[in-house]
Amino acid sequence: MAAALARRNHVWVGTETGILKGVDLQRKHAANFTTTGKPQREAAVSALCWGAGGETHILVGCMDRTVRCFSTEEGAFQGQRRCPGGEGAFRGLAQAGGMLITCVDSGVLRVWCGDDKEAPSDPLLELRVGPGVCRMRQDPARPHVVATGGKENALKVWDLQGSKEPLFRAKNVRNDWLDLRVPIWDQDIHFIPGSQKLITCTGYHQVRVYDPASPQRRPVLETTYGEYPLTAMSLTPGGNSIIVGNTHGQLAEIDFRQGRLLGCLKGLAGSVRGLQCHPSKPLLASCGLDRVLRIHRIRNPRGLEHKVYLKSRLNCLLLSGRENWEDELEEPQKPSEEPPEDSDVDELWASLEAAANGKLPRSDQTLRAPGAQKRNKCPRAGGLCVPSPQ
Amino acid sequence: MAKATVKSGGSGKKSLKRKAAMPEPQEAAVAGDGATEGGVQPPKATAFPPGFSISEIKNKQRRHLMFTRWKQQQRKEKLTAKKKLKKEREALGDKAPPKPVPKTIDNQRVYDETTVDPNDEERTVRLCQQLSTVIPNSHVYYRRGLALKKIIPQCISRDFTDLIVINEDRKTPNGLILSHLPNGPTAHFKMSSVRLRKEIKRRGKDPTEHVPEIILNNFTTRLGHSIGRMFASLFPHNPQFIGRQVATFHNQRDYIFFRFHRYIFKSEKKVGIQELGPRFTLKLRSLQKGTFDSKYGEYEWVHKPREMDTSRRKFHL
C-alpha cells in the first residue's frame, strides 16, 4: 500500500530535518520517508534529483555527505553512499549515464561510479571549480555538461568528458556608474532548452542571460527584480520566461527575451528555497522556509491551486513530470475485486435454488429485473437485493 | 407673584420683577432709566429672588445695568473680605495658613501623560535601563550609530546569548530587534504603548534582583512557538522559583503584551498582584533565519500587510 501511494506522489520535498516528504495532491496527503525513522538535523536534505531510468528513483543528497537512493516504486530508501571530499553541503546533484555527479560548497566537483557497492572514496573525476559554489546544474540536453556558479565564483560551464578547463567562463559586467566593481553572487543557473544559452539569478537581485556561442563573455541580457536576493529560479513551459523567488517570498515571472516583468505570484511568507515548473502544464511548485508547499497556476488564471502545510522547513523539491495527475491506478484494482464477489454470488444462488422450488423462485424473478447493476454493491445480499443471474 | 421687595425698601423702581408683574413697574423703570443714563448708579444692595439670574432680563440696557451693579457689589465684597483676611493674618502672625495660590489657566492645565519631566532622560534610554533590570544578566550599551553587523561578531566573541536593540523615533521607542546570538533567529518587532515605571499607576516598588518567572500565553502556531521560545531563552530556567516576580508575554490577535508583576498568595486560591516594571506591546514584523542581516538575510516569515491582513479573523502568531 505504501508502495502504491509512493508511486502516486506528485511532489517530493526534502526538509531540513532529513525527512523526504512525498505529497499527493489529488488526495491532499503527505507522507514522510526517513531512513532511521527519526528526524535528524545532521542529515538535512540539501539536493534532490531523479535517479536513472525515468522517475522511479530519487537521489537525496544530505548534509552529512551521503547520497541516499530512494525508490518511489517501493516507497523506501534503498541504499546510500558516502561522497567525501571538500566541505559544505551538496550544491548540485546529477545523474549522467549511470554515474553520479556531486558538487559541494567548497568547490569540489566529483564524478562517481554509479554502483553503490563500490568503495566510496574513488571518484572517477575530480574538478575544482572555485570556492563558494551556490549551484551546479546539469544540462538536460547534454548530460555530460554542467554549469557551476556561486558567491564571488563566476559562471563556468564544464564538459566532463572533455578537458579540465571550462568550456565557457563568464566575465563580470563592467564597473557601475561609480566605477566600482560589481560583486558576483550566482544563486541559481538554468540551461535554456533549444540553445546553448544559460540564465542565472543572483543574490544582488539581477537576472542575466549568457550565450557561450557568442564571442561576448559578458551577459547578453541583464534585468533586476526587487531589492532582495533571488534564491531560486525555474523555467516555464513555453520557453520564454522564468519564475524567480527571493528571500522575502516574492515570486515573479520575467520574460528573458525582452527582460521585462510579466507578473507576480502571491502567497509565500518566507524565503523561497525551491521552485520547479511542470514541463507541460502551467503549474509551479514552490517551497520555502515558511514550511508550506504551494502549487500555483501560472497562467489563465494566475493563482494558487494547492497549499500543503508540512511541518519542517523545506529545502528543495522535485516535481513529477508525468502527464496525468489523476488516479490512473485504481482500474487495476477493480478486476481483482470482482472475482471474490462472483464466488460469493454463486454460493448465494446455489443456496437459494437448493432451498425451495415453490415461492422463492417467483419472488426472485420479480426482483431480478431492476437489479441488473447491483452486483457490486451488495456482495452479501440476504436475499433481497438479488443480482442478475449469469 | 411676590414683588421683589428690596431690602432698603426704597427702590420700587429699581426692583427686579418677574415677568408677570412686568408692566407695573415698567414706567417707573423707564423713568428711572432715563434719569440714570448719564450718571453713575448709587450702589444699592439688591436682593434677587432665588433662582433668578441677570441673564433672564430681556431688555439689554436694563440687563447691562443690573450686571454692572452686581459687579460692583461683588467687588466690594471681595475687598472687604481681603481686608478681613489680611487683618487675621497679621493677627495670627506665623501661624497663618499659607497663601492660596491663585488659579490660572496654566495651573489648571489637564494633566498630560506625556509631559516630559525636565530632569528626565530620554524614554528609550530609560526603557533600556528598566528592561535590563527585568532581564537578568543583561547589560545596557549605547549604540552610537554602530552597524549591527559589526556589533554581532563582537557579541558572539564575548559569549552573549541574545542581543536586543531598541529602535527609537523622535525620542520614543518604536521598534525592537531580538537576535539570538549564535546564528539563531532574529525577530523584528514594532513596539507601541510603552509605559515606563513612573507612568504605571498603582505600582509596587522596584523589582529586586531575583530571576522572574515567565508566562507565555496563547502562542499557538508554529511561528508563535518559535517566537515564544525566543522570549523564553532570554531568561534562565529554574524550576525552583525564588522571588515572586513574573514576566508575562501574552499573545492576542497577533499583538504580544509584555507585563511585569509581583505576586503574593493571600490564601490557597487568592493571589494579589502588583505591577512593577515597564509594559509595552509588540507586533512581529519579520523573523529571519540567521542573525541580523536585513539586506541579504533569509526570512522565515515576513509580514506583508496587503496580502496577509485581508481577513479580520486570520492571525499568524
Image: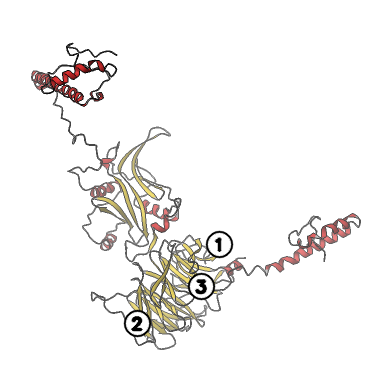
Query: In the rendered image, which residue does mark 2 sit on?
Result: A170
The first of marks 2 and 1 along the sequence is: 1
Q: Residues within 10 Å of mark 2 (few under 14, many from 20)?
A: some
Subunit bearing disc 3: A
Where disc 3 sits, the SS reads loop
Where disc 2 sits, the SS reads loop
**Apparent side of residue B238 relative to residue A306 in the rendered image (left or right):** left
Asked which quadrant contains residue B294, the reply is: bottom left
The first of marks 3 and 1 along the sequence is: 1
- Amino acid at dot 3: His
Residues at marks 2 and 1 touching, judged by CB atoms closer than 8 Å: no
Subunit bearing disc 2: A
Q: Which mark is residue A278?
A: 3
**Apparent side of residue B144 relative to residue B254 in the rendered image (left or right):** left
Q: Which mark is residue B301?
A: none
Query: In the rendered image, which residue does mark 1 sit on?
Result: A28
Between the residue at mark 3 and the residue at mark 1, the CA separation in whole angstroms equals 18 Å
Task: Please say if A144 is above or below A345.
Answer: below
Residue B176 screen position, x and y as percent? 31, 53
Q: Nearer the viewer, mark 3 or mark 2?
A: 3
Q: Residues within 10 Å of mark 1 (few under 14, many from 20)?
A: few
Task: Please say if A108 is above or below A367.
Answer: below
Task: Please say if B188 is above or below A282.
Answer: above
Where disc 1 sits, the SS reads loop
Which residue is located at x 76 percent, y 62 percent?
Answer: A375
Residue B263 screen position, x and y as percent? 35, 38
